C-alpha cells in the first residue's frame, strides 16, 4: 500500500491521514449478489444481480485502518484468475482518474462547443492522444528514471528545454529521462528541489505545451537550424 502525507495539518478524515507505505496481506472473497430494487409507487423495478469481490487486510499495523475494498462488477468471477483480474483492474482506478483529469482540465473537453458531431469526434481523438502522451511522460519519468531521454523526446526538444531551464548551452549527451521530465515540468510551474516529489500531470501538460513551441523555434531559426544547415 502506498504511503501519503496529509495536505493540511487540520485534516481529520481517516482516509486523508498520513500513512507509511507497506506490503499488505489480504484475504479475498467473491460471490454473486442480488441487489433489491428501490420502491417506486408508480412501477416495479427489477432486482439486479451482480458479482462482488471483497478484499480485506488480514493483519494491519497497530493503529492503522485496514484496507477493505468491496468491488461490484459485471465481469466473471468463477475462477481465481478472473477474481485477480478484477482486483488488478481496480488497482488502475487512480491512473484512469488522472487520465480523465487531463482530458477535462488539460484538454478542456467539457468547454468545447462544436456545431457538428464529426468535429467533436475528431477533437476527442486528438485529445485522447494528448492525454496519453502527458500521462506516459509522467509515468516514464518515475518508472524509468535512468533511461536516455531520447527514448521519449526529440533532440530539439531536450536541447531547447535544457537551455531555457538551465540557462546555459545544452550538454553534449542527452540527460536522463527523470531529469528531462523534471525540466519539462519546470516550464509548467514545478519547483525542482532535491527532495521534491516527482512532478504530476498538471505541470507536465503545461510544460509540454511550452516545450513544443521552444522545439519548433529551435528547429526553425535557433541553434537547431544552424546545426542542420
Image (cartoon, grey):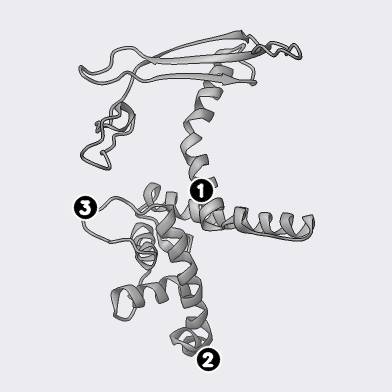
Quarter of the image holding residue 20?
Answer: top left
Quarter of the image holding residue 19?
Answer: top left
Q: Secondary structure at mark 1?
A: helix
Q: Secondary structure at mark 3?
A: loop
Cα gap from disc 3 to disc 2, whole angstroms? 42 Å
Instruction: Please give the residue where the numbered disc 3 appears in the rendered image.
Output: 195
**Callout in the foreground (3, 2):** 3
Label count reads 3
Image spot of residue 153 (x, y percent): 48, 65
Instruction: Please give the residue where the numbered disc 2 appears in the rendered image.
Output: 229
Instruction: Report the residue at 61% width, 55% height from top.
Output: 109
Image spot of residue 194 (x, y percent): 21, 57
Q: Is residue 34 above or below residue 122?
A: above
| Residue 172 seen anywhere in this rendered image of the structure | no
The answer to which of marks 1 and 3 sits earlier in the sequence is 1
**2 relative to 10 in the view: left or right:** right
**189 relative to 102 in the view: left or right:** left
Image spot of residue 70 (x, y percent): 48, 18
Cα gap from disc 1 to disc 3, whole angstroms? 26 Å
Instruction: Please give the residue where the numbered disc 1 appears in the rendered image.
Output: 101
Cα gap from disc 2 to disc 1, whole angstroms? 42 Å
Instruction: Report the residue at 33% width, 21% height from top.
Output: 24
Instruction: Report the residue at 61% width, 9% height from top.
Output: 32
Image spot of residue 49 (x, y percent): 66, 12
| Residue 126 seen anywhere in this rendered image of the structure | yes
The answer to which of marks 3 and 2 sits earlier in the sequence is 3
Could you tell me which quadrant the N terminus lies in?
Answer: top left
Give the camera-side residue of 114 and 152: 114
Amino acid at each position: 500500500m502506498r504511503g501519503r502525507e496529509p495536505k493540511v495539518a487540520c485534516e481529520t478524515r481517516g482516509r486523508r491521514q498520513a500513512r507509511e507505505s507497506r506490503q499488505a496481506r489480504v484475504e479475498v472473497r467473491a460471490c454473486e449478489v442480488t441487489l433489491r430494487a428501490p420502491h417506486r409507487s408508480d412501477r416495479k423495478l427489477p432486482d439486479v444481480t451482480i458479482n462482488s469481490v471483497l478484499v480485506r487486510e488480514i493483519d494491519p499495523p497497530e493503529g492503522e485502518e485496514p484496507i477493505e475494498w468491496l468491488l461490484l462488477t459485471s465481469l466473471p468471477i468463477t475462477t481465481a484468475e478472473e477474481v485477480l483480474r478484477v482486483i488488478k483492474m481496480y488497482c488502475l482506478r487512480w491512473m484512469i482518474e488522472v487520465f480523465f483529469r487531463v482530458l477535462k482540465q488539460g484538454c478542456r473537453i467539457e468547454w468545447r462547443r462544436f456545431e457538428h458531431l464529426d468535429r467533436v469526434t475528431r477533437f476527442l481523438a486528438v485529445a485522447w492522444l494528448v492525454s496519453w502522451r502527458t500521462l506516459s511522460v509522467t509515468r516514464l519519468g518515475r518508472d524509468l528514471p535512468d533511461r536516455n531521454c531520447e527514448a521519449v523526446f526529440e533532440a530539439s526538444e531536450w536541447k531547447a528545454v535544457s537551455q531555457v531551464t538551465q540557462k546555459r548551452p545544452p550538454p553534449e549527451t542527452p540527460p536522463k529521462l527523470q531529469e528531462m521530465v523534471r525540466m519539462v515540468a519546470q516550464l509548467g510551474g514545478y519547483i525542482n528541489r532535491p527532495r521534491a516529489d516527482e512532478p504530476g500531470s498538471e505541470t507536465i501538460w503545461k510544460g509540454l505545451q511550452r516545450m513544443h513551441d521552444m522545439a519548433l523555434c529551435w528547429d526553425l531559426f535557433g541553434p537547431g537550424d544552424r546545426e542542420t544547415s
